[in-house]
Image (cartoon, rainbow, N blue to C red):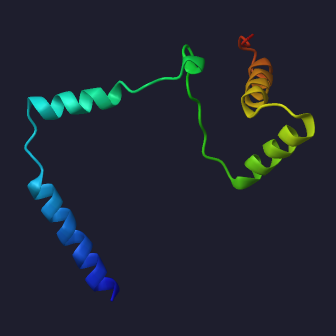
Amino acid sequence: MKGSKLAALKQGLKSTTAAAAPPGPLATEASASRTSSYKAPSREGRCHIAAVLPPAYKTSIRAVQMKHDKPLQHLVAEALNLLFEKYNVPTVAE
């Protein structure tokens, strides 16, 4: 059963890929418009920083967030500033 589902998915992928138009000026314009997506005004001048960590980190930071009623962004900024102090690099003031 699994083999037939996999074969059907592969066949569907092949037919979708084969039916796609070759890259041309229109395809380039479409991909360019996707990269310039909307950015909320509150995110202007800011960047996204992420890390993939074990779930225990999320549990602990959520506990601190609940206990002190602070937004996650503020807690992460505070943690990064403590890290910067430890390694003697400039901290960020907001």
Where 88 sits versus 11, above or below?
Answer: above
Q: Residue at x 77, y 31 (%)?
A: 71
Q: Residue at x 80, y 23 (%)?
A: 82
Percent position of residue 47, x then y: 55, 22
Q: Quadrant of the N terminus?
A: bottom left
Which residue is at the front of the view, 50 or 86? 50
Residue lying farthest to the bottom in this orientation: 1
Residue lying farthest to the right in this orientation: 67
Percent position of residue 64, x then y: 87, 40
Percent position of residue 14, x then y: 15, 64
Where 12 sits versus 27, above or below?
Answer: below
Residue 85 as seen in the image, left or right of residue 41? right
Which residue is at the front of the view, 38 or 4? 38
Residue 63 as seen in the image, left or right of residue 4? right
Which residue is at the front of the view, 57 or 22? 22
Percent position of residue 9, x then y: 26, 71
Residue 41 as seen in the image, left or right of residue 9? right
Tag count in the figure?
Answer: 0
Where 14 sits versus 47, above or below?
Answer: below
Q: Residue at x 8, y 34 (%)?
A: 24
Q: Quadrant of residue 94?
A: top right
Q: Quadrant of residue 74?
A: top right
